[in-house]
């Protein structure tokens, strides 16, 4: 990272401790195992779930809720990973970004040049990346 990049960017990056990451992945794996188990035991009268809930009529609802929560956890992980990468790119190119701003370039033009250098083509990924980089560039002083 360039000197002064942390000061110019502020606290963009969400710093998660290694203990927090371990907890997240442990919870993710446990939840995935439970969902996998429930997929094959919905409605089974001998399911382990019978110790907690006597009626099997709630099995499908519990499965859907836990699977939706598992999906949200995976989307959060992907979003956090994507955003962190763009922030590092902006930090690495901070001096060049500041020079481009002095020349009168807008955040959109700077983001477009960054994405062109990354060889990101038009489409959904390009639009998503463009929005993320512009948001990060707006935070840069």
Image (cartoon, rainbow, N blue to C red):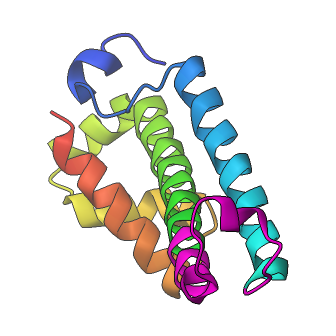
Q: Which residues are magenta?
A: 43-66
Residue at 74% x, 73% y is 38
Q: Position of residue 49 (x, y in %)?
A: 68, 65
Q: Determine the main secondary structure of the stretch shown in magenta.
A: helix
Q: So how many labels did they put on this image?
A: 0
Residue at 59% x, 31% y is 23
Say whether residue 69 is magenta: no
Q: Please, is residue 57 above or below residue 72 in the view?
A: below
Q: Position of residue 21 (x, y in %)?
A: 59, 30
Between residue 136 and residue 72, name the one nearer to us. 72
Find residue 119 and report its image quarter: bottom right
Q: Position of residue 65 (x, y in %)?
A: 50, 75
Q: Please, is residue 57 above or below residue 115 in the view?
A: below
Q: Position of residue 81 (x, y in %)?
A: 55, 48
Residue at 44% x, 61% y is 113
37 displayed left or right of 57: right
98 displayed left or right of 34: left
Q: Please, is residue 102 above or below residue 32 in the view?
A: above
Find residue 37 and report its image quarter: bottom right
Say whether residue 52 is magenta: yes
80 displayed left or right of 117: left
Q: Residue furthest top?
A: 3
Please state, as top left, top right, bottom left or bottom right, where the C terminus lies in the image: top left
Q: Please, is residue 133 above or below residue 140 in the view?
A: below
């Amino acid at each position: 990272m360039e000197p002064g990049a942390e000061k110019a960017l502020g606290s963009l990056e969400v710093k998660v401790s290694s203990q927090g990451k371990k907890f997240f992945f442990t919870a993710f794996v446990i939840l995935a195992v439970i969902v996998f188990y429930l997929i094959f035991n919905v409605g089974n009268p001998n399911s382990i779930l019978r110790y907690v809930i006597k009626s099997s009529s709630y099995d499908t609802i519990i499965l859907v809720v836990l699977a939706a929560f598992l999906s949200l956890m995976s989307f959060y992980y992907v979003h956090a990973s994507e955003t962190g990468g763009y922030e590092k790119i902006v930090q690495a190119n901070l001096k060049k970004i500041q020079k481009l701003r002095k020349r009168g370039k807008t955040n959109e033009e700077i983001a477009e040049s960054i994405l062109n250098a990354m060889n990101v083509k038009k489409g959904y990924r390009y639009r998503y990346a463009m929005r993320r980089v512009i948001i990060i560039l707006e935070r840069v002083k």
